[in-house]
């Protein structure tokens, strides 16, 4: 197996802890809801919202705006009507301030010594840039569905990374904790690395899909483990 030249990272759940960050924010602002249920409901609206864009029901819409549409819906569902427009805006911006997993910074720094590291996220460019600034994420380049006008798992996103660097797909590796993302990348000819994030959905909801798959080239506990595996494979 040839060594990749570019590592493209899924972000939400793989690089940053969206659930823990959102529940912490809900507690901080003392919103009278179950923080875990609210965070899960917000994320659950993500795929249906993107499907509305894919179907043509909505024009191309950046994730910030989809997140706000979902937020308005779930505030209604949870019976919350006390937030001002400014408070809703700031709450929606929590997606710009998601906290990295404990291994993220060290692992990305190690991987950056060997490879070009970029984002490949459905998050929009402004969101990803603010997140990188807030969390000190050492990206070489921020790429987004916004660049390609396609959300993952559309092939245009994965192949877009290869085209950006003028590389064949097999010289790009997608690093993600979501198997549908990795399968789609594999089908486009990219190499793939699965990262275990057992508590992505909260400390009380351990994921049960952490087994190795035939469509992943690497299977790692975290980014540090992946860096070590890739270093060993190149020796």
Image (cartoon, rainbow, N blue to C red):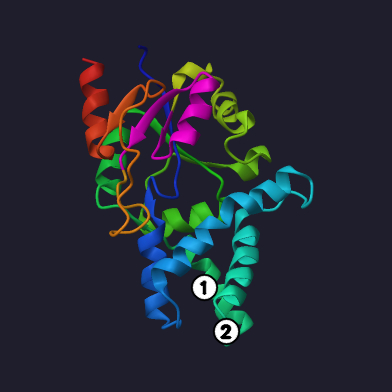
Classify 10 Å Cα crowding around label 1: few (below 14), some (14-19), many (20 and above). Answer: some
With respect to residue 94, does 194 lie above or below? above
The picture quadrant where one finds residue 46 is bottom right
Left or right: 21 with respect to 95? left
Camera-side residue of 103 and 32: 32
Local secondary structure at mark 2: loop
Q: Residue at x 31, y 28 (%)?
A: 212
Q: Which residue is mark 2?
A: 83
Q: Does 184 appear in magenta?
A: yes
Left or right: 235 with respect to 201? left
Determine if residue 124 is in view: no
**Outermost residue, top direction?**
1
The disc label shown at residue 91, or none: 1
Camera-side residue of 121 and 19: 19
Q: Residue at x 50, y 52 (%)?
A: 128
With respect to residue 48, does 35 lie above or below? below
Q: How many numbered marks appear? A: 2
The disc label shown at residue 32, or none: none
Q: Position of residue 63 (x, y in %)?
A: 61, 54
Write down the region rendered in magenta. Answer: 174-196
**Outermost residue, bottom direction?**
82
Determine if residue 207 is in view: yes
Q: Residue at x 45, y 19 (%)?
A: 171
């Amino acid at each position: 197996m040839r060594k990749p030249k570019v590592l493209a990272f899924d972000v939400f759940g793989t690089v940053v802890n969206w659930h823990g960050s959102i529940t912490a924010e809900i507690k901080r602002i003392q919103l009278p809801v179950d923080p875990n249920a609210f965070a899960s409901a917000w994320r659950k609206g993500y795929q249906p919202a993107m499907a509305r864009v894919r179907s043509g029901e909505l024009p191309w819409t950046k994730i910030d705006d989809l997140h706000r549409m979902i937020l308005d819906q779930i505030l209604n569902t949870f019976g919350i009507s006390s937030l001002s427009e400014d408070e809703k805006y700031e709450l929606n911006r929590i997606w710009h301030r998601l906290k990295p997993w404990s291994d993220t910074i060290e692992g990305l720094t190690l991987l950056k010594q060997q490879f070009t590291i970029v984002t490949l996220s459905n998050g929009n460019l402004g969101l990803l840039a603010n997140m990188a600034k807030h969390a000190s994420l050492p990206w070489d380049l921020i790429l987004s569905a916004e660049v390609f006008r396609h959300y993952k798992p559309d092939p245009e996103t994965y192949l877009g990374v290869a085209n950006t660097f003028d590389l064949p797909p097999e010289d790009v590796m997608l690093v993600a904790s979501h198997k549908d993302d990795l399968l789609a990348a594999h089908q486009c000819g990219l190499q793939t690395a699965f990262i275990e994030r057992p508590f992505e959905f909260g400390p009380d909801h351990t994921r049960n899909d952490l087994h190795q798959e035939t469509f992943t080239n690497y299977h790692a506990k975290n980014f540090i483990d992946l860096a070590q595996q890739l270093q060993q494979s190149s020796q």
